[in-house]
């Protein structure tokens, strides 16, 4: 895990409707050979992110967002410190045990953040158990996949 | 949280923080006396036992491991043992040791998460691990490092750390090489030192002054601190084979909980988990774990649930030492044995981090599951947690009838957290209501 300098991490639960988006984006991205980059999923155990951050220059995190401000399918893109300043705007970033922003705050307190961090938060509309991803989120998924591929190329 | 009148108080905790799953607490106080305490578990029931019916016997470990993301190994192991019990197969020593090794990983991971992230902020007076990390960064870093070695063990033996996929009835799909395991030795040794130092730090903290004459129930094995095998024993004289579980335990639906309440027939509530295992198996701890326990002067039985953090840390020391011992003698062998289905009923009972996890299955001669029953540890501890909250709230209100609801809530939450309840597993967490009349 520490042998890579970069990481792309998808968070979520593939059985909770739109919460699957981070996981499904990783399913797409594993097909590409991004140099020196760990492409992985984090399911349930969000504290594992701090383990992955170790010795990383760049980390991209993709997660679903529950949001009352933007419409489903909207893509938040936050970079480094911006993550912490915008948390009031994004009240609930994820459905996991310890929410993503809290894990990032903990990592920051422990001086364990990667040098650069980019977060894609895709606003979902349906997080019901057993449901499939909604169409608008599937469309947004394609946009994020293409943007990440372009970024690495 | 609200007061109805000066005589009637209703404390309502609508969501319990820093526990696994979703639940709530309702406390009713009338004329200064605690009348009712309900630990409400409202996480949706998931009907695992029903969906197992008609599935192949080999699918039970993977299906049931999905019950919990924190202790999937417990479900994998109990299901495997139950199926092997039905099919009358014996697992070779090397595979048995690998099963103990993956269980070491789960205990280290689960206990470290609870100790450092969920329980310790209470004892140090912080709202959460983030606040605690500002003043005690090294403590939190060490906790995360311990958790990581647990994850790594689970990944290596189980294929991945969340819901491992390498475990099967009869053994494993693939056995790790000795070299892969030996690579973990330096970090396991370092983590062993960190855990011993952490125990020393925790022993100097202040704990609730509360003790109860519990009936502790745990597995007991003649030679080992229990993970996978043994008879069920208690500190009050019980000693029975796991196949007699139904004879001794009663499962009951209660209106306020989606989890069944499980208790001992004619005896009432009991206590499972680290305190129980420790009380009943102290002599079988590994040398460094025993030495560390002696240093902080907790020899055998501990009747104070808030000191659970100390016992969990001793169990982390044990699990690290046991992992080193297993790796040291490990020789890679066949990854599994063939298990052919035979019609019958079988039982599996293993020690999840939070206590005994019991499985019972009936299969036909084609291997189809006809019946399944799963009893997770939190279902057994629920009644004891309620009784402890009743006692603690009673004492607090008796000492100070005007005690603020917020204070009652804080004490109750801390007590509940000290049990490390896994609501996700037992649903089958906290929202507090105090009803003062």
Image: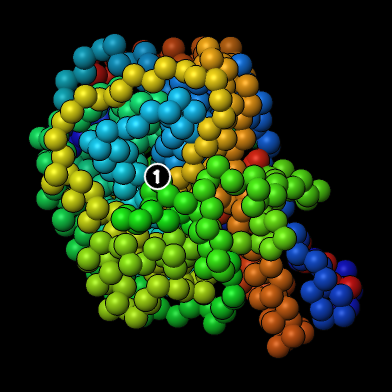
Q: Is residue B406 left or right of residue B293?
A: right
The structure residue drawn at horizontal position 27% and vertical position 33%, both measured from the top left corner, is: B92
Q: Is residue A123 above or below residue B308?
A: above
- Residue A77 visible, this angle: no
Residue B30 drawn at (x, y percent):
87, 75
Residue B12 drawn at (x, y percent):
75, 61
**Is B21 or B84 nearer to us in this picture?**
B84
In which quadrant is the N terminus of chain B drawn? bottom right
Residue B386 drawn at (x, y percent):
69, 63
SS type, badge 1 = loop
**Is B413 or B65 nearer to us in this picture?**
B65
The quarter of the displayed image where residue B210 is located:
bottom right
The structure residue drawn at horizontal position 49% and vertical position 28%, both measured from the top left corner, is: B86
Which residue is most to the bottom?
A: B399
Q: Is residue A73 above or below residue B432?
A: above
- Residue B384 visible, this angle: yes
In which quadrant is the C terminus of chain B drawn? bottom right
Q: How many marks?
A: 1
Q: Residues within 10 Å of mark 1 (few under 14, many from 20)?
A: many
Q: Is residue A138 left or right of residue B84?
A: right
- Chain letter of disc 1 in the image: B
Look at mark 1 in the image and give the residue it sits on.
B228
The structure residue drawn at horizontal position 70% and vertical position 56%, both measured from the top left corner, is: B265
Q: How is the image coloured?
A: rainbow
Q: Is residue B309 left or right of residue B326?
A: right
Residue B82 drawn at (x, y percent):
48, 33
The structure residue drawn at horizontal position 64% and vertical position 45%, both measured from the top left corner, is: B246
Q: Is residue B19 above or below residue B327?
A: below
**Is B255 or A48 nearer to us in this picture?**
B255
Q: Is residue A46 left or right of residue A66?
A: left
């Amino acid at each position: 895990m520490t042998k890579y300098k970069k990481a792309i991490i998808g968070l979520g639960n593939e059985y909770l409707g739109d919460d699957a988006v981070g996981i499904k984006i990783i399913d797409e991205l594993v097909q590409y050979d991004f140099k020196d980059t760990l492409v992985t999923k984090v399911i349930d155990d969000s504290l594992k992110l701090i383990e992955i951050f170790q010795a990383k220059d760049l980390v991209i995190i993709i997660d679903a967002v529950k949001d009352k401000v933007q419409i489903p399918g909207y893509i938040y893109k936050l970079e480094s410190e911006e993550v912490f300043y915008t948390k009031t705007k994004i009240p609930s970033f994820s459905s996991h045990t310890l929410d993503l922003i809290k894990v990032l705050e903990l990592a920051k307190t422990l001086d364990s953040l990667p040098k650069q961090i980019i977060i894609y938060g895709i606003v979902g509309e349906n997080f019901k158990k057993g449901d499939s991803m909604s169409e608008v989120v599937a469309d947004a998924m394609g946009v994020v996949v293409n943007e990440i591929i372009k970024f690495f190329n | 949280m609200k007061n109805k009148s000066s005589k009637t108080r209703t404390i309502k905790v609508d969501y319990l923080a820093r526990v696994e799953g979703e639940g709530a607490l309702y406390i009713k106080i009338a004329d200064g006396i605690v009348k009712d305490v309900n630990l409400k578990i409202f996480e949706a029931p998931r009907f695992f036992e029903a969906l197992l019916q008609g599935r192949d016997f080999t699918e039970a470990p993977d299906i049931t491991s999905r019950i919990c993301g924190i202790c999937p190994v417990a479900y994998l192991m109990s299901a495997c043992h139950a199926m092997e019990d039905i099919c009358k197969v014996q697992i070779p020593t090397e595979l048995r040791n690998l099963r103990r090794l993956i269980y070491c990983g789960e205990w280290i991971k689960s206990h470290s998460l609870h100790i450092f992230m969920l329980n310790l902020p209470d004892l140090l007076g912080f709202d959460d691990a983030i606040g605690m990390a500002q003043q005690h960064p090294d403590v939190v870093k060490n906790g995360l490092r311990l958790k990581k070695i647990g994850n790594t063990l689970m990944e290596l033996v189980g294929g991945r750390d969340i819901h491992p996929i390498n475990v099967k009835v009869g053994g494993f799909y693939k056995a790790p090489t000795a070299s892969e395991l030996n690579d973990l030795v330096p970090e396991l040794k370092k983590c062993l030192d960190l855990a011993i130092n952490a125990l020393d730090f925790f022993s100097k903290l202040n704990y609730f002054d509360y003790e109860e004459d519990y009936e502790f129930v745990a597995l007991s094995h003649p030679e080992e601190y229990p993970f996978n095998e043994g008879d069920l024993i208690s500190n009050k004289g019980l000693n029975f084979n796991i196949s007699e579980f139904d004879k001794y335990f009663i499962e009951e639906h209660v209106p306020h909980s989606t989890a069944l309440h499980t208790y001992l027939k004619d005896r009432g509530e009991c206590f499972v988990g680290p305190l129980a295992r420790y009380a009943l198996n102290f002599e079988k701890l590994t040398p460094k774990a025993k030495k560390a326990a002696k240093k902080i002067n907790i020899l055998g039985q501990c009747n104070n649930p808030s000191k659970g953090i100390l016992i969990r840390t001793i169990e982390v020391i044990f699990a690290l030492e046991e992992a080193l011992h297993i790796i040291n003698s490990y020789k890679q062998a066949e990854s599994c044995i063939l298990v052919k289905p035979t019609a019958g009923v079988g039982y599996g009972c293993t020690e999840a981090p939070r206590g005994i996890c019991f499985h019972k299955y009936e299969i036909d001669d084609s291997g189809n599951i006809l019946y399944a029953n799963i009893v997770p540890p939190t279902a057994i501890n629920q009644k004891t947690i309620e009784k402890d909250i009743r006692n603690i709230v009673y004492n607090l209100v008796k000492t100070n009838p005007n005690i603020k609801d917020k204070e009652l809530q804080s004490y109750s939450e801390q007590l509940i957290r000290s049990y490390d309840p896994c609501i996700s597993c037992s649903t089958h967490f906290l929202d507090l209501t105090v009803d003062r009349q």
